[in-house]
Image (cartoon, helix red, strand yellow):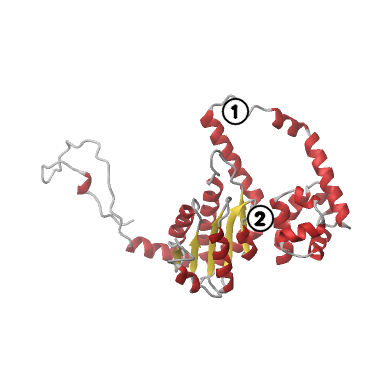
């Protein structure tokens, strides 16, 4: 690491940038740190290791990778960051600023969601995103996609879009009951994509465990608190979901679109050919708005209605 550059970065930024260099065990520690930064790092090395599901030596190896000599020195760096942040003019201004800024409810809601989108490059490690794209684009035997109470709709969206670029994609509505057979078909070379945001669901964790046991690559899309499903994941894509009154899905939708775009680009001609086949095969009945129903068809003299035009290919 460039010493001068590292000195100007927070520890969270350094960990985030180096995620791709870490071993799987070290990545677990890094995720635990980033999920509850900086408080997770103020606990003992043993406590942090327990949260991450690793060992104290793994925590110390991560600290060493950051160029810090000991865990107490690492914690001192964290305390210095906290003090600096609390005393900065920007932080003081942000804490004092009225929540609405006089801009009205809609403007405030839009501003909050733009901020969630802006945070996406900071919450999703580029190396993890690239690994997810590679796993989905590398001709997987089977892709199984599932979600929770709200995120099932995002899982359906990803499945419907990804299916146009990659073969053998299934949305799994009930992974541990009616659709368990599709999970049991997973094997080495398959991919399971699981959505799970707070409040985390047991089904998601068990589905990830089942897919992992079958030898599949497991990708978990979650919030920054990290779903328990990440314990069985090969790739974790955490997104900030803060919203009122419900968690916002804006960041997850953007991540889905970025994944599909990335997979299509990585698939090259194969992905384009798949899309062409899909377009030429699917039939969706279309409806069109008639601006002037009194206009008559020149040939028949009858009014044009929405049913006169339809059945176009997608």
Badge 2, how many Cα within 10 Å: few under 14, some, many 20+? Answer: many
In the rendered structure, the answer to whether residue 284 lies left or right of residue 7 reads: left
Determine whether, in the image, residue 20 is placed left or right of residue 197: right
Screen quadrant of the N terminus: bottom right
Q: In percent of the image, x 58 and y 73: which residue is there? A: 213
Give SS at disc 1: loop
Q: Is residue 234 visible?
A: no
Q: Where is the C terminus found, in terms of image quarters?
A: bottom left
Query: Mark 2 or mark 1: which comes first in sequence?
Result: 1
Give the image location of residue 265, x and y in percent.
52, 60
Q: Is residue 13 above or below residue 191?
A: above
User: In the image shown, does 53 or 159 lie closer to the viewer?
Assistant: 53
The label number, if any, that marks residue 46 in the structure image: none
Quadrant of res 294 = top left
Farthest residue toward the top? 102
The mark total stands at 2
Counting from the top left corner in percent of width and height, residue 162 is at 47, 60
Q: Position of residue 183 (x, y in %)?
A: 49, 70
Between 248 and 291, the one nearer to me in the picture = 248
x 54%, y 49%: residue:
254
- Residue 210 visible somewhere in the drawing: yes
Of tags 2 and 1, the one toward the viewer is 1
Reading the image, the residue beneath label 1 is 100
CA separation, marks 2 and 1?
A: 31 Å
Residue 40, position as x, y percentages in the image = 75, 51
Name the residue located 81 percent from the left edge and 39 percent from the top edge: 84
The residue carrying mark 2 is 125
Q: Image check: 313 left or right of 25? A: left
Q: Residues within 10 Å of mark 1 (few under 14, many from 20)?
A: few
């Amino acid at each position: 690491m460039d010493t001068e550059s590292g000195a100007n970065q927070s520890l969270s930024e350094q960990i985030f940038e180096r995620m791709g260099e870490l071993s799987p065990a070290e990545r677990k520690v890094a995720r635990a740190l980033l999920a509850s930064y900086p408080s997770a790092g103020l606990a003992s090395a043993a406590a942090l290791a327990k949260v991450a599901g690793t060992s104290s030596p793994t925590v110390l190896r991560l600290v060493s990778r950051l160029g810090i000599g000991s865990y107490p020195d690492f914690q001192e760096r964290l305390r210095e960051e906290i003090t600096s942040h609390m005393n900065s003019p920007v932080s003081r201004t942000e804490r004092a600023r009225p929540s609405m800024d006089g801009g009205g409810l809609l403007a405030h809601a839009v501003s909050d969601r733009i901020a969630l989108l802006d945070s996406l490059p900071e919450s999703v490690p580029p190396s993890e995103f690239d690994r997810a794209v590679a796993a989905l684009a590398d001709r997987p035997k089977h892709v199984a996609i599932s979600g929770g109470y709200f995120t099932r709709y995002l899982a359906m969206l990803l499945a419907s879009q990804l299916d146009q670029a990659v073969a053998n994609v299934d949305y799994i509505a009930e992974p541990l009951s009616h659709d368990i057979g599709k999970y049991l078909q997973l094997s080495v070379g398959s991919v399971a994509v699981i959505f799970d945001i707070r409040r985390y669901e047991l089904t998601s964790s068990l589905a990830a465990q089942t897919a992992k046991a079958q030898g599949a690559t497991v990708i978990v899309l979650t919030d920054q608190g990290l779903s328990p499903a990440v314990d069985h994941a090969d790739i974790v894509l955490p997104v900030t979901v803060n919203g009122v009154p419900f968690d916002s899905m804006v960041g997850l939708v953007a991540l889905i679109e970025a994944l599909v775009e990335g997979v299509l680009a990585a698939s090259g001609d194969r992905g384009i050919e798949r899309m062409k086949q899909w377009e030429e095969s699917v039939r969706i009945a279309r409806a069109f708005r008639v601006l002037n129903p009194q206009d008559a068809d020149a040939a028949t003299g009858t009014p044009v209605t929405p049913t006169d035009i339809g059945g176009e290919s997608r």
